[in-house]
Image (tube, coloured by chain):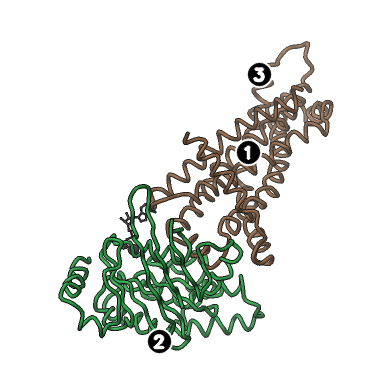
Amino acid sequence: MKFFFELGRYLLFLRSMFFKPERLSVFVERTLHEMNNIGVGSLPIVAIISIFVGAVTTVQTAYQLISPFIPVKIIGTIVSDSSLLELAPTITCLVLAGKVGANIASEVGNMRVTEQIDALEVMGINSSGYLGLPKIIAGLIMIPCLIIFANFLLISGGILAAQLTGIMPPNEFIQGARDTFTFFTLSVSMTKAFVFALIITSVSTYEGYYADGGALEVGEAGTRAVTRSCIFILFFDFIIAKLMLNA
Amino acid sequence: MLELQNINKSFDDKQVLFDINAKFEPGVPNLIIGASGGGKSVLLKCMVGLMKPEKGNILYDGRDFVHLEYEQVKEIRREIGMLFQGTALFDSLTVAENVKFPLKMFSKMNDSEIKDRVNFCLERVQLGGAGEKYPAEISGGMKKRVGIARAIAMNIKYLFCDEPNSGLDPITSRVIDDLLLDITAEYGITTMIISHDMKTAFDIGDKILFLYEGKIRWQGSKNEIHSAGKEIKELGAFIASSQI
Ligand SMILES: Nc1ncnc2c1ncn2[C@@H]1O[C@H](COP(=O)(O)OP(=O)(O)OP(=O)(O)O)[C@@H](O)[C@H]1O
Ligand SMILES: [Mg+2]
């Protein structure tokens, strides 16, 4: 019962955002501000994670595939494919759910419990649209960019690890990656990026918006935003994989 | 003029407001006095549309706020300013940006006119020099004054104040009262002030309304209180003594 109540309220919340913004210039300004927060602010953590995940995946794949019958460049194929299909979008977005999601939920939740959202409403501003829509649009623009960046660094991390540990030279890795690269795998990556971006930004805005009480509840809203975003990300990860790869 | 007709509000099974009827005139402060938990904040939230009463009408110069479309509600809200109990200043914006906010969203003024208006409003509440500070960097009394400046930035017709004196020392409290009084008279605003402070009531209340356990027990001017019955005076004394 509770689940359906929350789901219904979430969908109504999403719908309530799509009103004409009161002032377009303010809306654009807020969206740019959020793009900076979500995108630029997350670059370092995404970079660090991608490089290490790429390096570890390469070393572990090499460990599993050591055999004279298998050409080493296959490792490059496996790392780049799994990067595009799963590692870059999913791991990056799980991390962003923690960073961006908690940040959004506590910001909006704090505005709720200190009546700032009520203040917006009393002024005649559509508060869900004013607060939520710029975050969602910024997420839909910046998170896919971050995923492309993550893909790039993940494969670079793999190349670097392969080179440093003597598994294979870079050109062989790149050859392996190229062998199976298609725009279809890239499109799977980007589909996931858009869906996960929508989940992270909308779920965490929702959780903050309906925080009720005081500082304690704001903290709880932050935690709920992260756990629920992660669950939804993994669920839709499976759905997208099933629909796009297993027709 | 603001008129309340038969306002009823409950949460689940608990009724909080019972048949509230009242009229509030512009240019003079209207006070709602009541003991804690008596439904004052709920009544105010119904008046500004943050809560919806199950029954009753709220007429803003004849326009029934409760039963209008959202777009028309928004029109009326441009005429409303509100000073929240916790001030509800936007803490990511500076004091000046807070006052500028409604202008930036709604007014047709150009940038320099907006700047002048912001300065004017800040001067009006004696905060000319504090524009660049953030809400976290100023005192409680200053926050209340910024709240007033933000509320009057647009040319409002109705001003709602939820406990403007709470948490303030008597002198600062007096400053806020005087400010509200002056602004109300100066711009001919219909001002509603919630208070549990009988002193405020006698100092500035022109029309006073006693709300007790969700019902209006008495309403009239402060002069009428003196000639009112014994039980009203006792109720007033009780409300005054039941406060923190
Ligand atoms: N959102 C809500 N949900 C359920 N009950 C509520 C809600 N808001 C207020 N109430 C109840 O309504 C009653 C009146 O509350 P209200 O906040 O109006 O009191 P008040 O007169 O403003 O008191 P105070 O002087 O302490 O602020 C209380 O019993 C409160 O429990
Ligand atoms: Mg109250």
Can residue B126 be seen by looking at this rendering? no
Instruction: Judge depth for marks 3 and 2 and give the one in front.
Output: 2
Decide: few, some or many residues near mark 3? Use Cα within 10 Å; few <14, some 14-19, many ≥20: few
Front one among B198 and A84: B198
As measured in the structure, the alpha-carbon distance from the residue carrying label 1 to the one carrying label 2 is 57 Å
> Looking at the rendering, in which quadrant would you find the C terminus of chain A?
top right
Q: Is residue A185 left or right of residue A239?
A: right
The Cα–Cα distance between marks 1 and 3, rounded to whole angstroms, is: 24 Å
Residue ID for mark 2: B182
Q: Amino acid at mark 2?
A: Asp
Residue at horizontal 48%, vertical 51%? Answer: A106
In the figure, what tint was chain A given?
A: brown
Q: Residue A63: which disc?
A: 3
- In the picture shown, does residue B59 fall above or below A84? below
* Colour green maps to chain: B
Label of residue A92 in the image: 1
- Residue lying at 58% horizontally and 85% vertically, measured from the top left: B116
Spot occupied by residue B85 in the image (x, y as percentages of width and height):
38, 67
